[in-house]
Amino acid sequence: MTSASHADNSGGAHHPSRRMPDHNFRYWIIAPSVFLLLLIGLFPLIYSLVVSFQQITMTDYDTSFAGLTNYAQLFDDARLWQSIAHTLIITIIALPIELVFGLAMAHLFLERMPGRQIFISLIVLPTVISPVVAGATWRLLFDQRYGPINQVIGWFAGHDVIMLWNITPHLVYPAILICEVWQWTPFMFLILLAALSNVDKSLTEAAELDGAGFWRIFFKIVLPAIWPVMAIAILIRGVDLFRIFDVIWALTSGGPGTMTETISIYTYVQGFQQFESSYTAAIAFLIVGLMSVVVIWAIRRMGLAK
Amino acid sequence: MSDVRISGLHKTFGTVHVLKGIDLEIPAGEFTVLVGPSGCGKSTLLRTIAGLEEVGQGDISISGVNVNSLRPRDRNIAMVFQNYALYPYLSVFENIAFGLRARKMEDHEVRLRVNSAADMLGITGLLDRFPKQLSGGQRQRVAIGRAIVRKPQLFLFDEPLSNLDAQLRDEMRGEIKKLHQDLGITMVYVTHDQIEAMTLADRIVLMREGRIEQMGSPLNVYEQPATRFVAGFLGSPKINFISGELVDAGDRQAMRLSDGEIIPLPKRTQAWGQSIVLGIRPQHLGRSTDSKVKAGEVKLSRPIEIVQPTGSRTYVTIKIGGTQCIAETESMETGRPGETIDLSFDLQHAIFFDPTSGAAII
């Protein structure tokens, strides 16, 4: 052995950094966070699944297992299915309106114009506001005594109008939808603006020279290009709308009666006003099941999982 | 076939004045190439003809019709874009058929036209594919197919070959030239590549900083450049510029270089007592094989600095008047760096420029 190689060997032994690292070490590093995530994520899920098979109410000591009783009860609960119907009505009406408005606005703001940045920031503001604050604000705006909306309608009508937006049956849904569309159209606007500005401009120019009109260019060139982003936006807003709670809680609290009670509100009422803990857990799992089916179907259908 | 007339065209983007008064006539059926360095406004001019940019000031007419306020789709113009701009979600067939369908043509007529265009360009086998499945050259053909199928009155090309590799570029250049010969449509072609400009054009329009510097047939512009800029832009390797001053050499004027060399001028110039720039192309600065000095010839001996053989020709770099110059010699007679080479200077082809204005003076 030469002196040089000897020096190399001893050098290697003295430098721990040259040794192979302990392969398990990296798992030890992430272990605490994995544990924490399981604790706050997986544990409640499993625990509520267990609860849904018990008969816990917060007014009783009985925690015995009840089998599928809670799930059987779901099918006889007319108020539950009505709340799902209310949720679907709001989703089906609000989603296309937000999409079309957002797309139209994004199209307008595609062109360079003075003050563009400021306008975009202003338009996006509603989305930044907490939904419960937005709902409370709209409740004030719709107020019969001091709300400006009825005042303005009164000016146009030429006489005082009485419109009880959060009580009158045929006005509660429009009130909720106005607030919802006002708050979330900017979200669609922002995402679609980003998608539209990424469409290769030479494609639309080529189509223009080819003699295509606005709609042909939109449907054949622009829409396929923005579809992946648009599909995600629709999915996010669709899921959000299905969970709608704050705005309605602030505006109508589900009323009049149970007329605007959505699935989230009904679940909340069951859990924290009726204290039916086990039955609430069963409702929660019904929703998880329904949503999973819809979301998986949507992801496949939209071709997002490719 | 139709002609294009442009008069007094100005165009600004914000505070940038891109086109500064363009007057141009593009004769029907001719192949006109707009050439110039990047930022000279050639693409903007083309896009303005297409209607993709609004006319700032001035007039554009096609076939005698003023098109200033006409939408692009109503101008019956086809354009091939630099990135081809193929519609990615449509098949090659539908890409080519797009313009016909937009004009509500009947299905069997569409099929007929697309097939004949595909046949002409040799892309019949690709009609079912999608653009992303095609190579650069194939995309280029589809883009051309999409343009010719509509039988437009004017054909615009915006640097169509710049995304292709060198070999394919040569091939497509030939095909575009053949296309023009076969169809006889008026074509306007934008490029920054002077070889493309020289080989394709019936007429070259050389642009610089929003103005037309010179126009004419390629050979005309090449051999009689109006300015130093034009001389420097056309030709590869570049023309050599050597500066010196005007002196009186007995019965005639001459030019004295900074290394003392005296070069007699072929004609008298008014620019007496000034400095002057001599332009000589590498092919006119060859190796001297004869010891006799012919009329209109200047002999020089210089040490070789760099030798660049290309196969058919060899480019030798030497220093004349303090400037590095390239001389073109035949391949077999290469010297080595450090050796002295005898050069012959063909004064018949020398061009003299005013160093301040850049205009050719003799």
Image (cartoon, coloured by chain):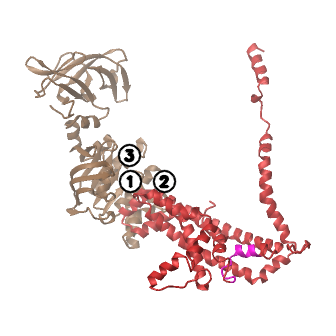
Chain colours: A red, B brown
**How many numbered marks have been drawn onto this rendered protein structure?**
3
| C-alpha distance separating marks 3 and 1 | 18 Å
x, y (%) of residue A188? 54, 65
x, y (%) of residue A62? 91, 73
Which one is closest to the eye, mark 3 or mark 1? 1
Q: Nearer the viewer, residue A304 or A117?
A: A117
Q: What residue type is labelled 1?
A: Phe
x, y (%) of residue B152? 30, 62
In this rendering, does residue B177 appear at all?
A: no
Q: Determine which of the numbered discs, if any, sits on residue A159 in the image.
A: none
| C-alpha distance separating marks 3 and 2 | 17 Å
Q: Which amino acid does label 3 sit on?
A: Glu
Q: Mark 1 points at which residue?
A: B81
The secondary structure type at the circle numbered 2 is loop
Q: Residues within 10 Å of mark 3 (few under 14, many from 20)?
A: few
Q: Determine which of the numbered discs, if any, sits on residue B171 in the image.
A: 3
Q: Is residue A306 above or below residue A16?
A: below
In screen coordinates, is B336 left or right of B287? right
Q: Tag 1, which chain?
A: B
Q: In which quarter of the image is residue A94?
A: bottom right
Q: What residue type is labelled 2?
A: Leu
Give the magenta-colored segment's residue range.
A257-269
The secondary structure type at the circle numbered 3 is helix
- Image quadrant for the N terminus of chain B? bottom left
Q: In this view, does A103 lie above or below B156?
A: below
